[in-house]
Image (cartoon, helix red, strand yellow):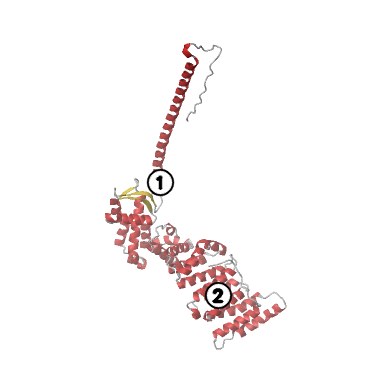
Amino acid sequence: MPAPANTLLIEGSFTELSEELAQYLDALRRTEGSNLPAEVAPLLEPLREQEQNGEEPNLKQRDEVLKKIVSAAVILNTAPEKEITAAYNLLVHLAHQSSNADRFLSRICTYLARPMASSSPHGPSLALSILTTIFNTLAPSDSSRYHVFLAVVAVIRQTGSTVAFDALRPQLATQLPGWLADWELDEEDTQKLHLAIADAANAAGDRELSNSHLVEALQTIPASEAGSKDSRELAVRALTSALSHPTIFDFTPLSASDAIQALRSSDTSLFELLDIFTADTLDAYEEFIASTPLATISGGVLAASADTLQNKMRLLTLASLAASTPSRSLPYEAIASALWIPATDVERWVIDTIRAGLVEGKLSQLRSEFLVHRATYRVFGEKQWAEVQGRLMVWRRSLESVLNVVRTERERFLRESVQAAATATTEEAGKGEKGGRPNGDRRRNPGQHQQPREIELVGGD
């Protein structure tokens, strides 16, 4: 979307361009009794004198002119297609010369986010092109970029175009965090932006990204407002979206939200369902559904996702079963019982759980068991720390056993090396004596002393 910063090169003074745009807008409006040039003429006269005398312009006077022009500029969406871009560029150029450009740019962006009656097929493309130009004429830290970006997202959401959203997606991943830091938005504006992105992502069919921005929006809610009506609606929306999404299995970010925790009292059944998906098994889920049908929970928004919810619970139950099995070996029988499925379907569900990234392992058809290599903990508390401690102790004992074997073998090797060296020395000495006294006649010279041999032994610890 945004490219390197650029500028609009438009010739003419503020008064000349304002007169030109006022006449153009008046011609588009064609409203009886409307005379925009006559309305702005008295305001432009002192500004023209200042320009002629080389004086600093009166910015407040400029703002009065821009109020009238920008208010009338909503008509630009009805302009001929070939004239829309040039007209909006001129309007943006004038807005940049005010004392408070953000005030006017935000309103211009709302116009661009609306449908263009004169160019319905190409309207979104034109709007995105103009908005991109506006975005890139602003400094990276300029908070006006926030309004432009909101308008860009709004246009993409209206079109529902996956192509347009795919072009925006890389910016969301790499640039958005930096932009948010530069713009220094308050909590309300930050939430508004994340909700706009969530809507656009959902319209483009990316429910997972939509859910992640719903969670981001939840995190902007202060604890003091967690129980408000708007916060509750957002919490219900985020939670039901996550529960009904077939590939979202981690509910920790949701549970950490104050607004979600407030559902404990306002939407008890929905919060209980979250608890089950966070840490419980299929048995608990089926028992809950038997007493509390999905149609009775928060307006029945989850009723259409009954199959998805049950399938997710099966995958999560298998993950918990794999994580809590000390032997790391799961018989098909145990899996079938926990997942409420026939034994013939076990391998399919294990493969689905592996594909979901919840477990890793190997199926053994010969022994009818699943050998677990890795399993995801759904929650990590005191019990899980105890399991980790137990496994670490087992590994420690195994390593100590291996170390003892290595130490024993090392000592045996050293002993054998010493013995071999001593034997070799003895044999060499014997051969030397025999070689120096042939036929038994040769005697050792009493004046010669045999030098002692030095044997360097390398000992072990």
Which residue extends farthest bottom? 32
Query: What is the C-alpha distance between the residues marked 1 and 2?
Result: 58 Å
Residue at the image position 33 percent from the left and 60 percent from the top = 310
Q: Position of residue 433 (x, y in %)?
A: 48, 16
Q: Nearer the viewer, residue 333 or 457?
A: 457
- Circle 2 Cα neighbour tier, 10 Å, few/some/many (<14 / 14–19 / ≥20): many
Q: Position of residue 197 (x, y in %)?
A: 48, 67
Residue at the image position 52 percent from the left and 19 percent from the top = 452
Mark 1 sits on what residue? Answer: 388
Q: Amino acid at mark 1?
A: Val
Q: Residue 179, located in which quarter of the rendered image?
A: bottom right
Q: Which mark is residue 312?
A: none
Q: Which mark is residue 108?
A: 2
Q: Nearer the viewer, residue 291 or 360?
A: 360
Q: Nearer the viewer, residue 456 or 396?
A: 456
- Above or below: residue 223 compared with residue 106: above
Q: Amino acid at mark 2?
A: Ile
- Could you say whether the residue bearing mark 1 is in a helix, strand or loop? helix
Q: Position of residue 447 (x, y in %)?
A: 56, 12
